[in-house]
Amino acid sequence: MSLSDPKYLVFLAATVLVFYLLRGHWPRAAMLLGASYGFYFNLSGYYEFVLFFVTAVAYTGGLLLSWSAQAHQRGMVFAACSVVLLAPLIVFKYLGFIFGIVSTAVGSTTPVLMLALPIGISFFTFAALGYLIDVYLEVIEPERRPIEFALYVAFFPLVTAGPIERGGHFLPQFDFGLQRFSSDRAIAACRLIILGLFLKLFCADTLVTPVNAIFADPAHFVALEKLFGLIYFMFYIYSDFAGYSLIAIGSGLLFGLEVLPNFRQPFLSTTVPEFWRNWHMSLSNWVRDYLFTPLHMHWRRNGNLGLVAALMISFLVLGIWHGAGWGFVLFGLMHGLLVTGSTLTLKYRDALASWVGTPQLIVRASRIVSTFLLVMLTFVVYRANSMHDAMLIYSDIFSNNVFRNHFYDHDAFNVIDIKSPTWLVVGAVIASYVLPSRGVFLEKQPIVVQMFAYNVGAALVLYGWVAHTAAPPFLYYRF
């Protein structure tokens, strides 16, 4: 039951109804926990034991840290709990990849066993680990209520693909006793859910067909089609993941819970570091706070060398978080290099633009375009099925073939046509960027305009449900 499935909306509505019919904090918390575990079992079956294991380790670890008085005891408890907490993630997600590397190194031909990946394991593991780090650093007090802590890790809108919540932000909101239904809050939540469904069902599920076709067999397509496929993929992955995040945020709001935002117009970023401040914000902020900042502080006496080392390690981890494969390793390293280069040269680029007298509008526009193109190129290794396919795509889009007369050869576009309605989808996503950035918000428009927009959006969502008998799952479910 995906968050874009009509059955999810029925499940969500029923859960909201029961939540507000119940009275008191404990019945509501217990009901939400039961609904969350039921939801996860529907998706992952008996892999639910992994979710329970991670929750139990983090909860117990927090209590043990509070009972440890001496620093060395706290350090040992934290290290042991962190290793045990990360063990399922390593076993299910990375063990096959590690064994594959070892087998290749020793020349073994023995097949490597690849375990099925529990849905959302990277998300709920990082949420639990972040909580444990905060308790260890005494940023927050350990949560002593087991039901509330289990709900923090397993809350059903977030458990499969985030956003990755922080214990200090989410747990204090778990006071359901005095929670009352609010029509204004419900309307705001429904707006987010409708927009999320629109991005997923109309935008992402329209773009995924040509994207999958091109990346499945890139040798079958001309250079310009590969370039278009890469552009489509960028808008697809944004629509898919931002759509999920909006549905999750809106779902949480129906229960009076404010969930951390995950996207803030990332394709309008003027630098790669800014892109990561606006893209998958819950993950990039997690890596910044729990990995980059401690490393940078530890190596701060080494100047730029320490900064570079902290950035490269942080982005390597960020890349590997997405998956076990050389493409994700390279993806992380590429972004580490881009962020490092941008950080170290920004003041010189600003000084050069000022010395030349380049208008700020041109500087900003050129940086937005160049940042988008650089980030887009890194996503080749992220999406390609193999390094061979990635190199094939790179060789074509950087060759003269991309500028040949394919624009006038309609037969060449057996998947992508520049006159295709698919570009309307790209235009819709761009509009969702540009209009808010210019201060144009739907909520500020006349009620007639709002009603028209929401009715059109709802109609397109219904069309998406009807047109896709088996809608593709959210991309980030596999992480």
Image (cartoon, helix red, strand yellow):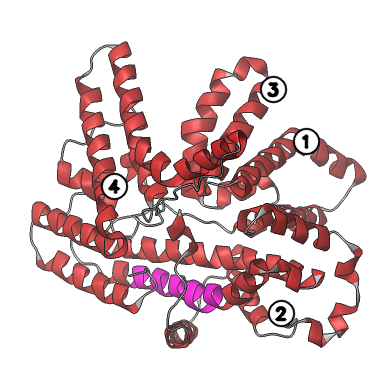
Mark 2 or mark 3: whose residue is earlier in sequence:
3
Dot 1: element: helix
Q: Which of marks 1 and 4 is in front?
A: 4
In depth, the one of 115 and 369 nearer the eye is 115
Magenta highlight range: 187-205
Whether residue 305 is situated above or below residue 22 in the rendered picture = above
Residue under the image location 49 percent in, 42 percent down: 285
Is residue 55 magenta-colored? Answer: no
| Mark 1 neighbour class, 10 Å CA radius: few under 14, some 14 to 19, many 20 or more | few
Q: Tell me if label 1 and label 3 are in contact, CB under 8 Å.
A: no
- Side of 411 where 128 appears, left or right: left
Instruction: Give residue 162's quadrant in the image.
Output: bottom left
Q: Give the Cα separation between the discs numbered 1 and 3.
A: 14 Å
**Residue 416, disc:** 2
Read off the residue under disc 4.
50
| Mark 2 neighbour class, 10 Å CA radius: few under 14, some 14 to 19, many 20 or more | many
Instruction: Give residue 2's quadrant in the image.
Output: bottom left
Is residue 199 magenta-colored? Answer: yes
Mark 4 or mark 2: whose residue is earlier in sequence:
4
Q: Which amino acid does label 2 sit on?
A: Ile
| Mark 3 neighbour class, 10 Å CA radius: few under 14, some 14 to 19, many 20 or more | few
Read off the residue under disc 1.
345
Mark 1 or mark 4: whose residue is earlier in sequence:
4
Whether residue 227 is situated above or below residue 160 in the rendered picture = below
Mark 3 or mark 4: whose residue is earlier in sequence:
4
Q: Give the Cα separation between the discs numbered 4 and 2.
A: 42 Å
Q: Give the Cα separation between the discs numbered 2 and 1.
A: 38 Å
Mark 1 or mark 3: whose residue is earlier in sequence:
3
Residue 130 in the image: state x and y as whole percent: 38, 37
- Side of 80 where 246 appears, left or right: right
Read off the residue under disc 3.
305
Query: Which SS does the magenta portion mostly show?
Result: helix
